[in-house]
Amino acid sequence: MRIVVALGGNALLHRGERPDASVQQHNIDRVAGALAALAHEHELVITHGNGPQIGLLAVESATDPALSAPYPLDLLGAQTEGMIGSLLGRTLHNALPGRRIAALVTHTVVQADDPAFERPTKFVGQVYPGDAAKSLARKRGWHIARDTGGWRRVVPSPAPERIVETDTIHDLLNLGTLVVCAGGGGVPVTADRDTGALTGVEAVIDKDLTAALLAEDLKADFLLILTDVPHVYEGYGTPDQRPVLDATPEALRRGGFPDGSMGPKAEAAARFVEHTGGLAAIGALDAAYEIVHGRAGTLIRPDLTGS
């Protein structure tokens, strides 16, 4: 079975952890352990988030006195793809001796007139107290929004239209390669309508929506979205909270999940199932093998009744 795995940023750096390289390496060791059993039985393509990492690089770039202007988000995104791709690639190499592993920097085409450029929603970087966040917003021209535990920077997150390197990824899979790609949703670019020339844009694409598009283009059988909760929950964080074990795309969309957390995951899973007739699931990293085999997580399946 061909599986596209979307790793949440929390798989690499948990909320509140110091963003040290050693911390991320420790977390990626756990990721490799969780995915190794799947990799022995299935073809895997692995994508990953980059919210904490790109936020850190953006702050460093904005405060570097050697720069006349901060690095744009597309280049910072490419840096995170290289860094996280290297960590994942070599750790998976160690966990899967003899397996071909390739980490690929990929580019995702978006529309220049996407309304998301006027409505930033994608959280990046660390959580700040309200006063500190407002001060940084004034000083650096950031947009900010409330997140769990405080305030964070938000940036545009346009819809992914096309992944430039899809054919290359497909060729690598046909050679038996486990591919790490489309990290952070891919480097955001626009494509000239006449020449096809690519230009980077200031954005961070949602990695789950890119994973759904990639899974569809690669004719994957399963989209596995891994995060830090064991299920999708109705009424999350309320006394009436309850796990959703099984849902159709239509039912999942009725959940009204928030943009900054479960919303994009639910939408990505729903799109993949609707467009392909395949299966998707959302659940915890440590249960990856059990989720694929129907013993954990939230399964999203086609509506076979047509109702």
Image (cartoon, rainbow, N blue to C red):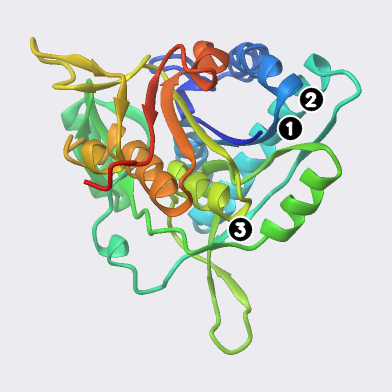
Element on which disc 1 rests: helix
Percent across and percent down for residue 52 are: 46, 31
Left or right? Give the position of 145 relative to 238: right
Q: Residue furthest bottom?
A: 194
- Mark 1–mark 2 CB contact (< 8 Å): yes
Q: CA distance from mark 3 to mark 2?
A: 22 Å
Q: In the rendered picture of this protein, how many numbered marks are placed on residues?
A: 3
- Amino acid on which disc 2 is placed: Arg
**Is residue 234 at least partly visible in the picture?**
yes
| As drawn, 183 above or below 164 | above
Q: In the figure, residue 74 lies in which quadrant? A: bottom right
Chain-order first, disc 1 or disc 3: 1
Q: For this view, does 52 lie left or right of residue 134?
A: right
- Which residue is label 2 attached to? 90
- Determine contact: label 3, label 2, CB under 8 Å: no
- Of residue 273 and residue 53, the one placed in the foreground of this image is 273
The residue singled out by tag 1 in the image is 86
Label 3 crowd bin: few (<14), some (14–19), many (20+), radius 10 Å: many
Residue furthest right in the image: 98
Q: Secondary structure at mark 2?
A: helix
> Seen in the image, is 290 located left or right of residue 139?
right
Residue at 44% across, 60% down = 202
Task: Give x and y (percent) for residue 157.
Answer: 37, 53
Q: Does residue 194 sit above or below 54 in this rendering? A: below
Q: Would you name the residue on which mark 3 appears?
A: 107
The mark that comes first in sequence, 3 or 2, is 2
Give how far across and how far down residue 13 sits, in percent: 50, 20
**Residue in view at x 76 percent, y 20 percent:** 40
Q: Secondary structure at mark 3?
A: strand
Question: In front here: 199 or 266?
Answer: 266
Type of the residue with mark 1: Ser
* Residue drawn at x 41%, y 26% as measured from the top left: 282
